[in-house]
Amino acid sequence: MSDAVGAPEGAVEGREPAGEKTIFGHPRGLVILFLTEMWERFSYYGMRGLLVIYLTQHFLFSDERSSVIYGAYTALVFIMTIIGGTLADRYLGQRKAVAYGALLLVLGHGMMAFEGSGSREILTYQGQDYEIALDGRGGDARQLIVSDAGQSVIGFSNGGAMMEIADPQAVGLPASIPADAYATRIEQEALYVNILYLALALIIAGVGFLKANISTIVGALYGYEDLRRDSGFTIFYMGINLGSFLSSVTVGVIGIVYGWSWGFGLAGVGMLAGLVVFLWGQPWLEGRADPPSLETLGKKVLGPINVEWACYLTGVGIVAVSMLMVMNAHLIPETFVGMLGVVVFIFMIGYAVTKLHGDERARMFAAMYFILAQIPFWALFEQAGSSLNLFTARLVDKTMFGVTVPAPVFQGLNAGYIVIFAPILAWLWVALAKRRLEPSTPVKFAVGVFLAGAGFLALVGGINASGSGAALTAVYFIFLIYWLHTMGELMLSPVGLSAVTRLAPARIVGMTMGAWFLYSGLSNYLAGLIARATGAQTIGGQLTDIAAAKATYVSVYSQVGYIAMGIGFAMLLVAPFIKRLMRLDTLTDDHAHALAGEAELAEPLAPGTHPPQKAGA
Ligand code: GLN
């Protein structure tokens, strides 16, 4: 197919602005955005890694309630990017939106460090109160019962019907107590639970203002015809994963070993570093993220409140709404997420049809294709934290060089691979583009989705190689699936950011980036459904029938593997059509220049319309 090795998407050589200050051949603003996003993701992933354990062990929320809070939080974080993106497009500009988002994030992560003394679980037996506590944090913590006299480790037998007390004398209780002979209740400190909700809401609003907009600024560093665009986004993506990798080996460990507040506090300090870098590095962005119009920003809307402050107050509103939603997450119907996806889709189509014309509309349809085409990828990729993590924990022989490696360690493989392979791909895209051999964006996407499926089929091959009995799967296959998924991710995720910032009309680029993240977040919902299908029978969190569990994994993983490969293949077939929809021939810097010139007469310069620079001029 000629498209697979087609022309480099309409790019023309020598389109980097003359006189541009670069570092390693990229605009120096990329360094600032790389570091800011690295620290933002450091705090985000560091905090997220601790969150569920914190909810269950410190606040003693049930497993169900904790996962509902976690689910609502991670969904809202992505959902709010559409509001942050839209406000930046219309009024604030990306620079102010990112700075404000970073400030909210520093407050939110900082607030997470106020943990209080935690919830207490009180057990009443024969009219006497005892406290149930843990002797540590994390998966290895043991349950204790504490009385005035002393304390003892406890365990449960008969599927929880009997409580067994290791040292009955120490607490003055019998060695086993049937479950119906005692009652338990949980006492939470309302103040600290509310601080937790507020902190989560601040983070949701903060990411909402920051995440989509910082990607938009990366896009604004490159002209439409700049050959370095995908490469720049791939380097930026490396920053994201470097942050996530560094936090998993610092925030996660410190939070568990030294205490929650130390971990969360460190995440907050990381975010503060991000804010400082961003503010300090402003000159290097060379005005490419400025507000669309200072005049509009200063316009009064209500008494002393001008448009700029109204945007910040909207942020406070997002905090309030998010706090209410996280608190009442268990009341939100599960279908809400799916419905939201449909509503946003209809809105975007409606916008494109009524407000856009000609090439602009065609490009917007292409951007929407990419936004939707990421769904099958993330639905498979996001098994990493759920079903694949459990599979690794239970069904893989994790002994390497005589050491049994704990399953969560494999979670770091993805970020590790990205840090290694992102620079290689960043180089490859530019090198291929210069030779006019770079695959088009829709082809890269097709390969990305295909690789997500291929990864699962490779793992299924590994499971089958271990036979149909209870034998464990060799650990190499875990390295292999994560590698294939990471290569797929690099084909799709940074490339998608690059394409969306290039294809969306400048005046709605933030909103469109918001939609990208929204659907990327919604894909997690689908990922949850797939993970649920792999669920096996367990007692006390351990499998009861290993061979049956293996068979379930083989069946679900090969189904999703084949489906994704099929979708990838279909995407390859439509790639030439999508490429035409991108209208690359008219997507030139000169054209943008002309448009911006016209726009200036009617309305102020749209944000993200990077000061159009005539290449080679
Ligand atoms: N891991 C990437 C990030 O945090 C991509 C997230 C996504 O789009 N789902 O930015």
Image (spheres, rainbow, N blue to C red):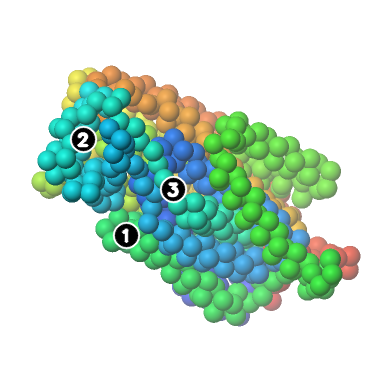
* 3D distance between C-alphas at marks 2 and 3: 23 Å
* 3D distance between C-alphas at marks 1 and 3: 19 Å
The nearer-to-camera label among 1 and 2 is: 2
Q: Secondary structure at mark 3?
A: loop
Residue plotted at (72% across, 47% down): 364
Which is nearer the eye, 463 or 548?
548
Q: Earlier in the sequence, mark 1 or mark 2?
A: 2
The quadrant of the picture occupied by the N terminus is top right
Q: Which residue is mark 2?
A: 155
Label 1 near ligand 1 (CB < 8 Å): no
Q: Quadrant of residue 546?
A: top left
Residue 102: x and y in percent read: 56, 66
The nearer-to-camera label among 1 and 3 is: 3
Q: Is residue 519 above or below residue 43?
A: above
> Is residue 192 among what the camera can see?
yes
Tell me which amino acid carries mark 1.
Answer: Gly
Which is nearer the eye, 36 or 441?
36
Q: Which residue is mark 1?
A: 259
> Is residue 419 among what the camera can see?
no
Q: Quadrant of residue 425?
A: bottom left
Residue plotted at (51% across, 46% down): 74
Side (left or right) of 337 relative to 196: right
Q: Residues within 10 Å of mark 1 (few under 14, many from 20)?
A: some
Q: Mark number for residue 188? A: 3
Residue plotted at (22% across, 29% down): 177
Side (left or right) of 144 relative to 116: left
Q: Is residue 468 above or below residue 132?
A: above
Which is nearer the eye, 404 or 317?
317
